[in-house]
C-alpha cells in the first residue's frame, strides 16, 4: 500500500531534523547563530503544534480552566476584594490580616471628577506579612497599618480631605497578594499608583539625608503639605501634571458601578482561559 504523501513528507522532515541535531552537536555555533537557531526552532515548534491541532480529529475545548494559573488567582482575589463593602478610610480602625486594598475618592476636587463616586479606585496596593503566616492573626495588622498610613498622609496634604475617601480591604492567604495587586493595577490603572506613572508618591516616605536631592513626587507637587517633601525640587509643574491626569482619564476606562467591574472581571477570566488567544493571524513571521 502506497504511503500517503503527507506521511512521506513528515518522515523526510523528521530525518532532516535528526541531521540538524547532529550538525549542531558537531559544529561550534557562534552566539548570534545560536540565537537565530533557537528562534527558528521555536517557530517550528509552534507551527508543528498548530499542524497537530489541524489534523487531530478531536477538537480542543474553547477554554481550559486551571485554578492554579497565577493570572487567574490574581483575578479571583481581586474580584473578592471588589465584593467587599466599602468603608470610610478615616474611620477604619485596626484589624488583623495582610492582603490587598483599594482606595476610592468621593469628593469634589475637579481634578478627580471623572472617578469621584465611581468604582474606579484612585489607588490600590498590597500589604505583605513577615515570613509565611497561615492565619489572619499570625499575619498581624499589616493591612490596617498600611491603610492607616495612607490616611495619615492624606490628612497632611492640601486639596483633598480624608472624609472624601472610602476603601476596600481583603485579608488574603499569604502569597496571593502580589498577583492580586498586579491584576488590580492592570485593570484599573489607578492615577496615584507608581505603575501608572503620572501622580505617584502617596506611599513615599521621608528621604534620608543621603537622598535629599530627590525630586518632589507629583503627589507632593499637586498636594503639598508633607514637611519632609517641602525642600525637594519640582521637576514638573502642577499644570503639567494636571494635564497628564486629564489625558489619562480621557483615555482610561472608568467603571461607573460594580456591575461594570464584575463584567470586566468575567471578560478577563474568559480571555485567560481561551486556548486560541495566540492564533496564527496574530503571530508575526520570523525574521532573519
Image (spheres, rainbow, N blue to C red):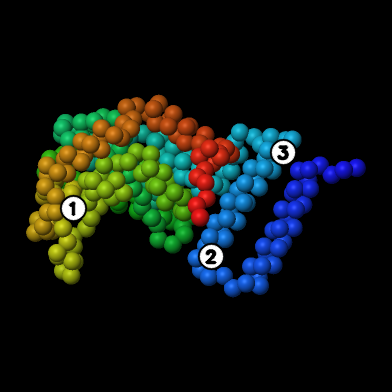
Q: Secondary structure at mark 2?
A: helix
User: Does residue 35 lie above or below 13 as drawn?
Assistant: below
Residue that appears at 43% across and 56% down: 138
Q: Residue at x 32, y 41 (%)?
A: 189
Q: Which residue is mark 2?
A: 33
The relative height of residue 225 versus residue 279 in the rendered view (above or below) is: below
Q: What residue occupies the far right of the structure in this picture?
A: 1
Q: Is residue 18 left or right of residue 116?
A: right
Find residue 240 and report its image quarter: top left
Left or right of 220 in this view: 36: right
Estimate the x, y position of residue 27 in percent, counting from the top left. 62, 72
Residue 242: give x, y in percent of width and height.
16, 40
Which mark is in front, 1 or 2?
2
- Identify the residue under disc 1: 217
**Residue 55, numbered label:** 3
Please name which of the two marks, 3 or 2, marks the residue nearer to the observer: 2
State whether residue 119 appears in this view. no
Quarter occupied by residue 279? top right
Q: CA distance from mark 3 to mark 1?
A: 58 Å
Q: CA distance from mark 3 to mark 2?
A: 33 Å
Residue sitting farthest toward the left: 231
Residue 1 vs residue 6: left or right? right
Q: Position of residue 9 (x, y in %)?
A: 75, 48
Task: Check contact, mark 1 vs mark 2: CB within 8 A.
Answer: no
Say above or below: 189 vs 30.
Answer: above
Give the CA distance from mark 1 to mark 2.
46 Å
Residues packed near mark 2 inside 10 Å, few (<14), some (14 to 19) or many (20 plus): few
**Quadrant (top left, top right, bottom left, bottom right) of the N terminus:** top right
Residue 175 appears in view: yes
Q: Residue at x 72, y 38 (%)?
A: 55
Amino acid at each position: 500500500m502506497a504511503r500517503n504523501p503527507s506521511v512521506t513528507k513528515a518522515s523526510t522532515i523528521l530525518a532532516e531534523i535528526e541531521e540538524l541535531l547532529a550538525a549542531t552537536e558537531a559544529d561550534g555555533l557562534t552566539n548570534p547563530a545560536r540565537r537565530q537557531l533557537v528562534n527558528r526552532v521555536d517557530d517550528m515548534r509552534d507551527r508543528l503544534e498548530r499542524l497537530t491541532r489541524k489534523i487531530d480529529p478531536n477538537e480542543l475545548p474553547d477554554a481550559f480552566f486551571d485554578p492554579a494559573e497565577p493570572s487567574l488567582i490574581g483575578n479571583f482575589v481581586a474580584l473578592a476584594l471588589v465584593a467587599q463593602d466599602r468603608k470610610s478610610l478615616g474611620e477604619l480602625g485596626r484589624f488583623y490580616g495582610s492582603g490587598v486594598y483599594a482606595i476610592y475618592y468621593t469628593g469634589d476636587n475637579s481634578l478627580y471628577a471623572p472617578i469621584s463616586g465611581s468604582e474606579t479606585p484612585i489607588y490600590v496596593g498590597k500589604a505583605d506579612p513577615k515570613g509565611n503566616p497561615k492565619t489572619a492573626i499570625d499575619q498581624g495588622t499589616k493591612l490596617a497599618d498600611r491603610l492607616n498610613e495612607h490616611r495619615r498622609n492624606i490628612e497632611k496634604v492640601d486639596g483633598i480631605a480624608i472624609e472624601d475617601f472610602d476603601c476596600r480591604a481583603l485579608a488574603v492567604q499569604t502569597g496571593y497578594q502580589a498577583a492580586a495587586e498586579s491584576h488590580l493595577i492592570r485593570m484599573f490603572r489607578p492615577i496615584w499608583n507608581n505603575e501608572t506613572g503620572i501622580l505617584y508618591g502617596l506611599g513615599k516616605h521621608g528621604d534620608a539625608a543621603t537622598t535629599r536631592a530627590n525630586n518632589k513626587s507629583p503627589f507632593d507637587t499637586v498636594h503639598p503639605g508633607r514637611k519632609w517633601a517641602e525642600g525637594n525640587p519640582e521637576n514638573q509643574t502642577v499644570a503639567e501634571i494636571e494635564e497628564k491626569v486629564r489625558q489619562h482619564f480621557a483615555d482610561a476606562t472608568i467603571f461607573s458601578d460594580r456591575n461594570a467591574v464584575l463584567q470586566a472581571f468575567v471578560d478577563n477570566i474568559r480571555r485567560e482561559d481561551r486556548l486560541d488567544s495566540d492564533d496564527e493571524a496574530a503571530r508575526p513571521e520570523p525574521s532573519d
